[in-house]
């Protein structure tokens, strides 16, 4: 079964609102932030709303064990020049994990961080140190390290960097990977030969570590290291290449999450999911939305 969804909001109705939005897109999974990704302001989790959300998911065929949470962007585990900010990132990540546990969410996607002025090896060591502080034997939430485009001093731009981090985690069963097709393209991966990438990933890390895939087209050429998402079929990766990834049998049971741009403030997730299920690109999609 295709497990497909998109990023949704987590507003006043919290998880219940997220579920309702996902249902409106005809999705069977989704991804959300537990608050604004750019700040640390968070509202207390309302258990009654969570219970309503769980019942609604069950009634509409949304796969709760495949729902994904995303950690806020302000967390940077790679930069230790300001020790207070570094410790804040560790503490805030732990709090986000606790919020996921309260919601019953198993997976939390995390941008590994940016080295800033550190050497990359030092930045990677900082990430390892931080993750070993937040992950424990009894931890309920798995951290998914996201593949990055390589913009600026981002860590996680290739398999080798992710492997180094994972190899040095004490509880390796508490960490996984989230692939992002736009980021992979922008980092230099040939998306048209994705099975070769999967072969390399399997050899170095293991396909079992892949727990989520962000499905995005790219506005950039391969290797541009810019990280600019495009709507499905309207970027340089192309519809056919993305369909091959989505329906790759080696990735069958992994949730695919769209993070594509809005058009004039309107999300295209419902239409994109429809195209993906039909395996047919609507060339007039962007024009139809503006009519």
Image: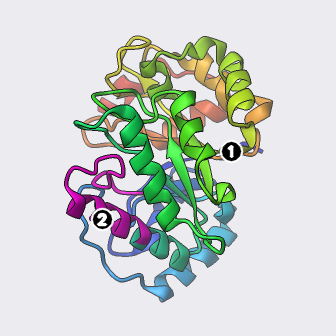
Tell me whether the residue at label 1 lies in contact with that at label 2, contact meaning CB atoms closer than 8 angstroms. no
Q: Quadrant of residue 193?
A: top right
Query: Residue 232, can we see it?
Result: no
Q: Nearer the viewer, residue 110 or 104?
A: 110
State which quarter of the image contains the N terminus: top right
Question: Image check: 209 left or right of 26?
Answer: right
Query: Of residues 161 and 277, which is closer to you in this image?
Result: 161
Residue 158 visible in the snapshot: yes
Q: Nearer the viewer's eye, disc 1 or disc 2?
A: 2
Horizontal side, residue 142 vs residue 111: left or right: right
Q: Nearer the viewer, residue 261 or 252?
A: 252
Q: Residues within 10 Å of mark 2 (few under 14, many from 20)?
A: some
Quadrant where the C terminus is found in the figure: top left
Q: Quadrant of residue 202?
A: top right
* First along the sequence among labels 1 and 2: 2
241 or 131, nearer to the observer? 131
Left or right position of 61 against 260: right
Percent x, y of residue 85: 23, 60
Q: Secondary structure at mark 1?
A: helix
Q: Inspect the magenta stretch and tell me whether residue 83 lies in it.
A: yes
Is 91 magenta? The answer is: yes
Task: Report the magenta residues as a range.
Answer: 71-94
Residue ID at (38%, 59%)? 9
On screen, residue 224 above or below 142: above
* Residue at the image point whose x is 48% and y is 65% from the top: 133
The residue identified by callout 1 is 209
In the image, which disc is placed on residue 171? none
**Badge 2 is on which residue?**
87
Give the percent coordinates (x, y) of residue 131. 49, 58
Residue 41 in the image, given as x and y percentages of width and height: 24, 71
Question: Is residue 271 depicted above or below 221 in this figure?
Answer: below
Q: CA distance from mark 1 to mark 2?
A: 27 Å
């Amino acid at each position: 079964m295709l497990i497909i969804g998109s990023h949704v909001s987590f507003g006043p109705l919290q998880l219940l609102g997220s579920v309702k939005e996902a249902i409106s897109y005809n999705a069977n999974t989704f991804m959300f932030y537990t608050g604004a990704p750019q700040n640390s302001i968070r509202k207390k989790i309302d258990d009654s709303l969570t219970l309503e959300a769980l019942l609604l998911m069950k009634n509409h065929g949304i796969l709760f064990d495949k729902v994904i949470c995303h950690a806020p962007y302000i967390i940077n585990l790679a930069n230790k020049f300001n020790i207070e900010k570094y410790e804040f990132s560790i503490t805030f990540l732990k709090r986000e994990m606790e919020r996921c546990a309260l919601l019953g969410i198993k997976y939390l996607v995390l941008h590994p961080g940016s080295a800033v002025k550190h050497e990359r090896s030092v930045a990677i060591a900082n990430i390892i140190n931080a993750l070993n502080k937040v992950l424990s034997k009894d931890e309920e939430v798995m951290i998914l390290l996201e593949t990055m485009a390589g913009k600026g001093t981002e860590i996680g731009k290739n398999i080798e960097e992710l492997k180094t981090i994972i190899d040095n985690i004490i509880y390796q069963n508490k960490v996984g990977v989230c692939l992002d097709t736009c980021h992979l393209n922008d980092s230099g991966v040939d998306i048209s030969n994705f099975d070769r990438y999967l072969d390399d990933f399997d050899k170095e890390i293991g396909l079992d570590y892949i727990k989520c895939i962000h499905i995005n087209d790219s506005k950039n050429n391969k290797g541009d290291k810019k990280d600019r998402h495009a709507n499905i079929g309207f970027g340089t990766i192309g519809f056919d290449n993305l369909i091959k990834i989505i329906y790759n049998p080696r990735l069958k049971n992994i949730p695919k999450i769209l993070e594509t741009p809005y058009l004039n403030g309107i999300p295209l997730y419902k239409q994109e999911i429809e195209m993906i299920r039909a395996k047919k690109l609507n060339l007039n999609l962007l024009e139809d939305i503006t009519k």
